Image (tube, rainbow, N blue to C red):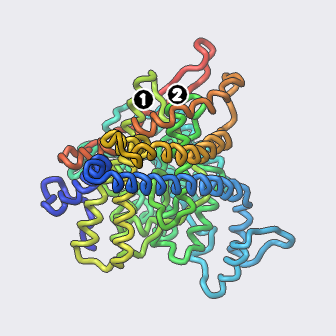
Amino acid sequence: MSNIEIPFPEERGRRYRFFEILPGALSYFMLVLPVILSLINVTLAAVFVLVYLLINFTRGIAGAIRGLHGYHVMRVHQKYPWAQMLTELEAGEISPHAKRPAWHIAELKRLAERPLLMPPSQVVHAIIIATVSETEEILQATIESVLAEDFNMKQVIFVLAYEGRAGAATENRVNGLIERYKSDFMDAFAVKHPANLPGEIIGKGGNINFAARELQKYLKQQHIDPVRVMVTTLDADNRPDKSYLNALTYAYVAAPDPLHASYQPVSLYTNNIWDAPAPMRVIATGNSLFNLVISLRQHALRNFSSHAQPMAALIETDFWSARTVVEDGHQFWRSYLTFQGNYRVYPLHVPISQDAVLTEGYRKTLRAQFIQLRRWTYGASDVAYLAEFGFFRKNQVPKWDLWTKFWRLLEGHVTWAVGPILVLISGFIPAFFNPKNFAANELPLIVSHVQTVGIMALVVTVFMALRTLPPKPARYKRHRTVFMVLQWVYFPITTLCYNSLAAFNSQTRLIFKRYLTKFDVTEKAVVVETKEHGAVIRK
């Protein structure tokens, strides 16, 4: 497609506006539907409530099982000797007496009929870290985690993409870090994103977009084929597992259609989990569990947060959009349409650890968490984008696949908004309007039994929370671990007040054209030990 850019607000006609309104309209309709049915036919209302709750119950149990499986797969993949497996892949044979996974052996056998894209030793990785005003402590920890990779850093180009609007302090900090670490990489440089470029909103998309274009110029100067270059975008607090680059290299060179794909590691919000307030720990752990689950469902996997894509494919899609605050998820649809549906996301079952929301002051942290989730749920804006460019613009995207993906996108955002509320209160609605009806009065009892069994899913979540915890900092005593279990009393509150209300906020904004035109950066903070004041939060 010649033009895949999000239309400016003034360019969005009635059809586009219809699909912008659709997610919110459906969410509000679903919210009042039990009331409407209770007034019309109480039996019909009871059936609707039961069916809806059973669907969510089944999803919860399935999610818990997949979460356990996803965690197991991730731990196994972290232990693989990726560097040796890459050597074997390039040589075309397994080292003598080596024990290897069956899929690796099968991949070696397929080399005769499907050669590698290129030898692994020829792959160049470009890592772009986006920053605004994060402290040197946060950036340095991320850079050090990259350098700790079990990978040849002379195959890595490091790029610090920073905002010019952040001022001289950020510019000096970034240039100082480049000077300090430049010799550790194949090359390293900083890219200053100018403020107020035409057609951009303030956000990460414009920053990494500008940096990637500068990287493209650099590759041309150095005569490096973009097909050789795999680009990973990281936030300032993202710390990849030591096996990330090796696993990414393997996936890239061995994939059946490597250029028409993105590569998605597992995002775990564990960096500062011991220091974050209890509600934020609950939300962070829930998000980590969801990412483990979705890593096993490739058909539903989308670009999220830190992800990788070949430079050649980025050039063809004209990089990321600078007109949205959800440039990561939107990049999936941008690539899907560019490649006429011939596009997928391959899971990398290795983690990239990130920060839970934490900043100075409890109330400020609570607010920052809501703003982060509001930005994530603003992905509902892609419903109109996909409908417009998929159904009403000329393309060769397979229509059955398009309908399936459109429905999954729409249903996911509606459930994000209305699901927690209906699960909590819908069982009581028929009885409220029909207090003398037997079926209506029995419904809350049935619902309570279903929800009791559903607690199994929460138990699995608590178990996963404990399993994914990093080592407890020495400044905390043993009872801190007890609080990591007791914190789950917040689960119903955080689900309603954050996930559901954030989704309704985003969808209501789309209804009334109150678009998010600024990427509200989630404040990053670390707890550091000082001799004078002990443990303090430093932004």
Q: Nearer the viewer, residue 262 or 184?
A: 262
Q: Earlier in the sequence, mark 1 or mark 2?
A: 2
Residue drawn at x 74%, y 65% is: 84
Residue 252, label in figure: none
Name the amino acid type tagged 1: Leu
- For the residues labelled 1 and 2, say whether their Cβ atoms are less than 8 Å apart: yes
Q: What is the residue that sits farthest to the top in this orientation?
A: 532
Name the amino acid type tagged 2: Pro
Q: Is residue 162 visible?
A: no
Locate residue 69 relative to residue 392 in the image: left or right.
right
Quarter of image, res 304: bottom left
Distance from Cα at disc 1 to Cα at disc 2: 9 Å
Task: Measuring from the top left, give residue 488's x and y in whole percent.
Answer: 56, 34
Task: Measuring from the top left, give residue 203's x and y in whole percent.
Answer: 33, 45
Task: Measuring from the top left, give residue 81's x and y in whole percent.
Answer: 74, 61
**Residue named by callout 1:** 366
Q: Nearer the viewer, residue 379 or 490?
A: 490
Residue drawn at x 24%, y 52% is: 25
**Residue named by callout 2:** 277
- Determine whether 480 is above or below 132 in the image: above
Badge 1: few (under 14), some or many (20 or more) residues near its Cα, within 10 Å? some
Task: Measuring from the top left, give residue 180's x and y in whole percent.
Answer: 56, 39
Residue drawn at x 66%, y 39% is: 466
